[in-house]
Image: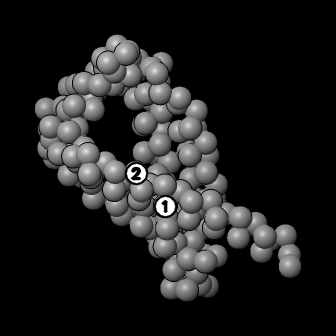
Amino acid sequence: MTTTRHQGEALALIRIALGVTILATWAQNLADDLYTGDGLRGLLTWLATEAPNGNGGSLGFVHSLLDSVVAPQAGAFAFIQLVVELLFGLGLTLGLFTRLSSLLAAGFFLTLFLAYFGGEEWIWTYVILTAGAVAVFVGYAGRTWGLDGRLFSGRRSPATLLW
């Protein structure tokens, strides 16, 4: 076995672990009604509320953005989040459009880092998740044990960003 093969398998394991983690969290959030307008507004309130009843921190510009842009349209944002999280979770798990899915995941994890910053949540988990998603993107991790490898092997185009 070559080092390159081992690297592809290691990145595929990271990809699958990220995908399963996202899907498990998605299912829990769905059960907890976080993908509704009221559920998302409740989360935003919890993020801004001081501990012990809330997270108690974050960067001011993040809360300003959440309060002025997301909260007034919480129902629409909750639905978008429901769909997009499911899609990139499935994409990573199955290795389909992996590079696009990993970019979406990295952006999502980075926003969670910023939203929880300075509060009670241990934010460094989101740094690790972001690094994993970036590694999956850089390493074309859908080509090992993924549908991208079967569907798009050998194809090169400007759309390679997607897979």
Residue 66, located in which quarter of the rendered image? top left
Q: Relative to residue 44, is residue 84 depicted above or below?
A: below
Q: Relative to residue 141, is residue 105 depicted above or below?
A: above
- Residue 20: which disc? 1
Quadrant in which the N terminus appears = bottom right
The residue type indicated by label 1 comes to Val
Drawn side of residue 56 relative to residue 77, left or right = right
Q: Secondary structure at mark 1?
A: helix
The residue type indicated by label 2 comes to Thr
- As measured in the structure, the alpha-carbon distance from the residue carrying label 1 to the one carrying label 2 is 8 Å
Q: Nearer the viewer, residue 156 or 40?
A: 40
Residue depicted at 50% across the width and 48% down the height: 106
Residue depicted at 56% across the width and 77% down the height: 146
Residue behind mark 2:
25
Crowdedness near tag 1: few (<14), some (14–19) or many (≥20) residues, C-alpha within 10 Å: some
Drawn side of residue 82 relative to residue 123, left or right = left
Drawn side of residue 110 relative to residue 70, left or right = right
